[in-house]
């Protein structure tokens, strides 16, 4: 007797997202298919379309969750103890730590290897950048130009991009990250 295929009612959005998340981390966007996701879950690929219009829709749902995690991290730092300069430093280090401790997710969010999808073109990315920019402005002792805030973001992104794949986690680059963040703060203050 062959195993029963999951019906649309049995298939949850979370099951699809969990399997797709695994596959997108392990493989390039082009190497993942709705069929391969369905096969691992044990349903027909058509059943996935009940929850997602296409593979890109599923991909964007996943990276939206990653941006929410990054947003929550920024919120926690801002609401936490310490003066504004200490919090600004923590926001910058937190961004780098997130990027280096979640390298595959960071790549999907900020540096996809495929022209078919672009995480930065999504509303979740815009809202996350806006949150980061507002945090930098509110925590800085100076009124900053938009270009200065963007330069700080690009500097953080450049650091993560440089170390991504060279280290396994933030701890291996912590000292360099701290020096880099001090440099950015000195430039902004």
Image (cartoon, rainbow, N blue to C red):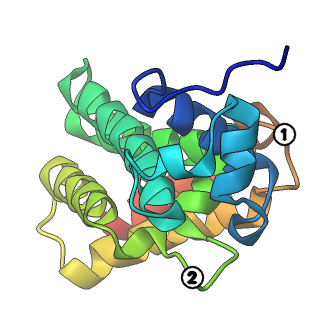
Residue sitting farthest toward the front: 1
Marks 2 and 1, how far apart at CA: 28 Å
**Quadrant where the C terminus lies?**
bottom left
Residue 148 x, y percent position in the rendering: 30, 77
Specify whether 183 is left or right of 81: right
Residue 176 x, y percent position in the rendering: 72, 49
Above/below status of 180 relative to 82:
below
Specify whether 46 is left or right of 19: left
Residue 168: assigned label: 1
Tell me where residue 162 sits by quadrant. Answer: bottom right
Please tell me which residue is depicted at 60% across the width and 86% down the height of the picture.
Answer: 115
Above/below status of 71 relative to 13:
below
Tell me where residue 86 sits by quadrant. Answer: top left
**Quadrant where the N terminus lies?**
top right
Residue 137: assigned label: none
Residue 116: assigned label: 2
Q: Is residue 92 visible?
A: no
Circle 2 residues within 10 Å: few <14, some 14–19, many ≥20? few
Q: Are marks 2 and 1 in contact (CB under 8 Å)?
A: no
Above/below status of 92 relative to 72:
below
Residue 142 x, y percent position in the rendering: 15, 63
Residue 44 x, y percent position in the rendering: 62, 43
Mark 2, secondary structure of its residue? loop
Please tell me which residue is depicted at 59% across the width and 53% down the height of the picture.
Answer: 106
Please tell me which residue is depicted at 58% across the width and 26% down the height of the picture.
Answer: 6
């Amino acid at each position: 007797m062959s195993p029963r295929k999951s019906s649309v009612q049995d298939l949850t959005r979370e099951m699809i997202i969990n399997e797709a998340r695994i596959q997108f981390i392990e493989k390039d966007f082009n190497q993942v298919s709705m069929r391969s996701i369905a096969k691992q879950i044990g349903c027909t690929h058509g059943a996935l379309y009940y929850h997602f219009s296409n593979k890109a829709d599923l991909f964007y749902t996943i990276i939206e969750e990653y941006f929410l995690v990054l947003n929550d991290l920024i919120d926690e730092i801002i609401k936490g103890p310490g003066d504004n300069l200490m919090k600004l430093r923590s926001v910058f280090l937190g961004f780098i730590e997130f990027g280096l401790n979640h390298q595959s997710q960071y790549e999907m969010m900020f540096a996809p290897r495929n022209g078919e999808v672009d995480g930065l073109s999504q509303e979740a990315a815009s809202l996350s950048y806006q949150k980061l920019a507002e945090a930098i402005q509110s925590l800085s002792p100076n009124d900053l130009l938009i270009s200065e805030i963007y330069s700080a973001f690009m500097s953080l992104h450049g650091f993560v991009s440089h170390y991504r794949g060279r280290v396994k986690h933030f701890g291996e680059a912590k000292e360099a990250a701290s020096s880099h963040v001090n440099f950015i703060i000195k430039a902004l203050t």
